[in-house]
Image (tube, rainbow, N blue to C red):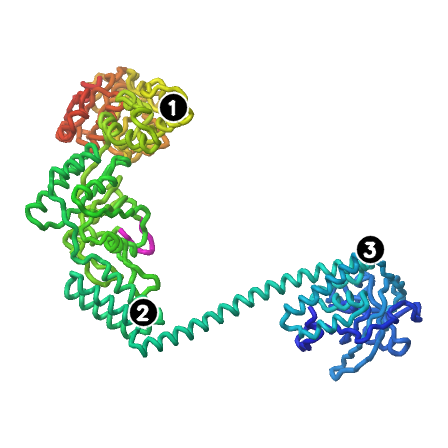
Amino acid sequence: MFEDLFLNNPKIEVDSFPMFSVVEDDDMNPSADLPDELPLLALKNTVLFPGMILPITIGREKSINAVKEAEKGNKFIAVTSQKDIKTQSPSRDDLHQIGTIAKVVKLLKMPDGTMTAILKGRFRFGLNEITQNDPFIKITYHLLETIEAEDPLELQATLATINDVARKIIELSPHIPKEAIVMLQNIKQNSFLLNFIASNMKLSVNEKQSLLMESDFLAKAKKVLGLMGSEVQLLELKDQIDSKVRGGIEKQQRDYFLNQQLKTIQEELGNNPSQEELKELAERAKDKKWSKEIQQAFDKELKKAGRINPQIAEYSVTINYLETLLDLPWNEYSEDNFDLKNATKTLDKDHHGLDKVKERILEHLAVLKLRGDLKSPIICLVGPPGVGKTSLGKSIASALGRKFVRMSLGGLHDESEIRGHRKTYIGAMPGRIIQSLRKVKTSNPVFILDEIDKIGKDFRGDPSSALLEVLDPEQNTSFHDNYLELEYDLSKVLFIATANSLSSIQPALRDRMEIIDVSGYSAEEKIEIAKKHLVPKQRKEHGLTTKDVSLNNKVLGEIIQSFTRESGVRSLERKIAAVMRNTAKKVAMEETYDKNIPIDKLEDILGPARYSRDAYEKNPIPGVAVGLAWTQVGGDILFIESSLSNGKGKLILTGNLGDVMKESASTALSYIKANADSLGIDSKMFSENDIHIHVPQGAIPKDGPSAGITMLSALASLFKGKAIKSHLAMTGEITLRGKVLPVGGIKEKILAAKRAGIKTIMMCKENKKNVEQINLSYLKGLKFVYVERMEEVLKVAL
C-alpha cells in the first residue's frame, strides 16, 4: 500500500511519484483568491488528490507551456487525468471532468530536455469548458464541496477501522518500514487521511478517479475501506504462502543436516543402515533354491548396490531388482493332490457337463502321478460366453491343490505387459506373468489367460507374438523377462486360455495350444445347473431360504425357453435373480404369496415372454425352409425365404449375406436349372420370373456354406409349389455335382434346433460321427436323416 512513500524504484513506469505534505495546510479551503480561468495539465497514468505533493515529469509541449504559465502567475494550475494514456492531444471528451486544482511548488529543468514540476493538490473542481487550446489548454471551472456525514458516529467508526486496517497492511507488508505507523498517527485531518491512503494504495487510475469524484465523505471512506480490505486479504495470502515455502525450505535443510549427522554418528558406531539392508538381502538369498547363474547375477547386483550412494535414485532401482529376485518362487512348487476320485468329485461339484475338459485334466493328473514329473499342457477352451470357461480354472486349481491366477488379456496391446520393461527405465517392473508368480509364491499355479482372442496390437508391440514363447512347452522352460534379464522356468505352470472364437487368434499361437471346444448347454443341462448352482446362489445373495421360495423344473424350463436364448447361463442367472428380488420384496413387506412360483406368474415378474417357439412349429408355406447356423453365442435356426415375380430370370439376394452364402444360393439355383426335367419343373419359369431369396434379421451379417441344402430345398419348394415337411431343419454344403458336404458346429446347431421345437434334422452323412460324440440326453426327441446327394435332400424335404 505505502511502498511508494519509502521505495525509490527507478524502474517504475509512471510520470509521477506520490508524496505527502509534512504539515497539513489550513489553506485547503476555497477561501484563497483563484482566477476564473486556469491552465490545465492532463496526467496520463495517475491522479492527484488534495493535500498530496506530486512530482510530475512533463514531456508534451502543451503541458510544459501550461506549467510555465502557472509558475509565472499565481502558481495555480488545474490538474485532471486522461481517459486513455495513448491520446497525445486530448480534447474535452478525452479528459475526466473532475480533477484537482494544484499549486506549482517548484519547476525543474532536467538534463534530457524534459521538465519536472512539483505540484501540491489543493481543491477539487469540476470542468466547465475549454476556452483555449494553444499554446496550452485553458479552462473555466467550478469548485466542488464535500458532503459531510449525517451520522458522525458511523464516520468515526469507519475512520477508526481504516486506521486499524492501515496498520495491519504496514505490519504484513515486508517492504513498508514500521515507522509508517507513526506517520499515520500524526495525521489529524480526516479528509487528508483518506486522500493520503487513496493516493498511495496500489489502485488503477479509474479506481483512484472514482474516489476523487466521490463528494459524499462517508461513502468515500467506505470505498477506501473496501479497497483496503481486498489488499489485506491479498497480503495475508502472500504471507501464508511465504510462511509455507519458508517452512518447507527450513524443514528440508533441517532434515538434511540431521541425516548427515545421523550418518556420521552411525559410521562412528559402525552401524550403517544401507549395509544392514544389503546384509539382510544376502541372508535371504541363502535360503533360495535357485541355479548358479541366478546366484551369480544376484551377487553381482548386490556388490553393485554396496558401491552406490544410497541417496541417489539408482540405489533404490537396484534394491527393488534384488527384492524381486528374492520374492520370486525359484524352483518352489506346491504339492499336487493325486487323489483322482477327489479331483473328479471337485470338478463335477462345481461344473455340470464339460466332460472333455474334465477328462483331459484327469489324464494329466494321472500321468503326473505315475511319472512324478511332466510338462503341463497348454489348453485353450473355446466356446460361447457364459458356459463356465473362466470359472472352470478355479475348479481345476482346487482339484489339483494348486494356487490360482487369472490374467485378463482383453484389450491388451502392449508387449511389455507380457515381457516387462527393462530395469533402466524409470518405474520399470516385470511383466504380469512374473508378477503373478511373485504374488502366489509358487512356480506351478493354474494360470488362466482369459479372452486370448481379444488381444490388441499397435505401435507398442504385439502381445500375442510375445505369448508364443510363454505357451510353447519347448521354449517356456527358459522364459526371458526384460526386467529380470534371466531365464525363468514356466514349464510347470498349467496354462489354460479361454476364447470365444479361434478366428482372431494368430495361427502360430493357435498351433501351440491344445484346443478343446466347450459347446453350449441343452435345456436339460441348464435346468440341472440352475437347480444345483444358480438358484441356491441367488437365494443366498438375496437373503432368502428354501422356505421362502422354490422353483420347480417346469418353471425353470419355461424361463429357459421363453425368457432366454443363449448357449451359456448368464442370462438365466439374471432372470432367476429377478424372481428372487420380487420374492424378497414380498417377504420384506410381509405380503402373502405362493412360495412355489407358478408358471403363469412369470410374466408378472419378468415381463412378456421374449421368445416363442410358435413360429418354428407352424407349417411353412412353399419357398420357406429352416436352416441351422452357428454363432459366437451358440447355435441358432435360420429361415430361408424365397419368392417369384415377373421378370427375366434375375437372382436377387437380401438379408446381409456374405460372399460364401451368396455363392451357395447361386449353386443351388444352377443345380435346379440343370435338373429341372428330373425335378418336374417347367424351365420357362427361370426365364420368365425373377427369383428373390431373403434371410430375415437383415441387420445381422450372415455367411458360410452350411445353408446350401436349405437354399436348395427352399427354391425347389418354390418352383414346385409344395411346402417343405413340417418341423424339419437342415444344414450342409452343396456342390454343382449334387453332392452334400459336411459342416461344423453340429452340437450347437442340434441344441438350437431342440430349443426351437424342431423334430427332424437333416445333414451330411459324414457328420454322423459328430452326432455320435454328443450326449444321448441332448438327442432325445430328435430324428436324424443323413444324406449324401441333393436328390435325397429333396426327397426327404418335399
Q: What amino acid is labelled 1 in the image?
A: Ile
Are the residues flagged by discs 1 and 3 in contact, CB closer than 8 Å?
Answer: no
Q: Which mark is residue 181?
A: none
Furthest-front residue in view? 269
Category of crowding for the residue at label 2, using alpha-carbon neighbours closer than 10 angstroms: few (below 14), some (14–19), many (at least 20) = some
610 to the left or right of 376: right
Q: Residue at x 90, y 77 (%)?
A: 73
- Given the image, on which type of amino acid does mark 3 rest? Asp
| Pick the front one: 491 or 601 | 601
Q: Residues within 10 Å of mark 3 (few under 14, many from 20)?
A: few
- Residue type at tag 2: Tyr
Q: Main secondary structure of the magenta part?
A: loop
| Residue 330 locus on image (x, y percent) | 18, 58
The residue singled out by tag 1 in the image is 605
Distance from disc 1 to disc 3, alpha carbons, whole Å, reads: 77 Å
- Residue 361 left/right relative to 280: left
Q: Is residue 428 visible?
A: yes
Residue 83 visible (yes or no):
no
Mark closer to the chain start, 1 or 3:
3
Please tell me whether residue 144 belongs to the stretch shown in magenta. no
> Given the current orientation, which residue lies at the most extreme left position?
370
Q: Is residue 167 left or right of residue 507?
A: right
> Which picture quadrant has residue 482?
bottom left
Q: Which mark sits nearer the N-terminus, 2 or 3?
A: 3
Position of residue 303 relative to residue 83, above or below, is below
Label 2 vs label 3: CA separation?
A: 75 Å
Q: Which residues are magenta?
A: 456-463
What residue is disc 2 on?
A: 315
Q: Residue at x 42, y 75 (%)?
A: 257
Instruction: Name the residue carrying label 3.
Output: 151
**Which of the two discs, 1 and 3, sits closer to the camera?**
3
Please say if 157 is above or below 796: below
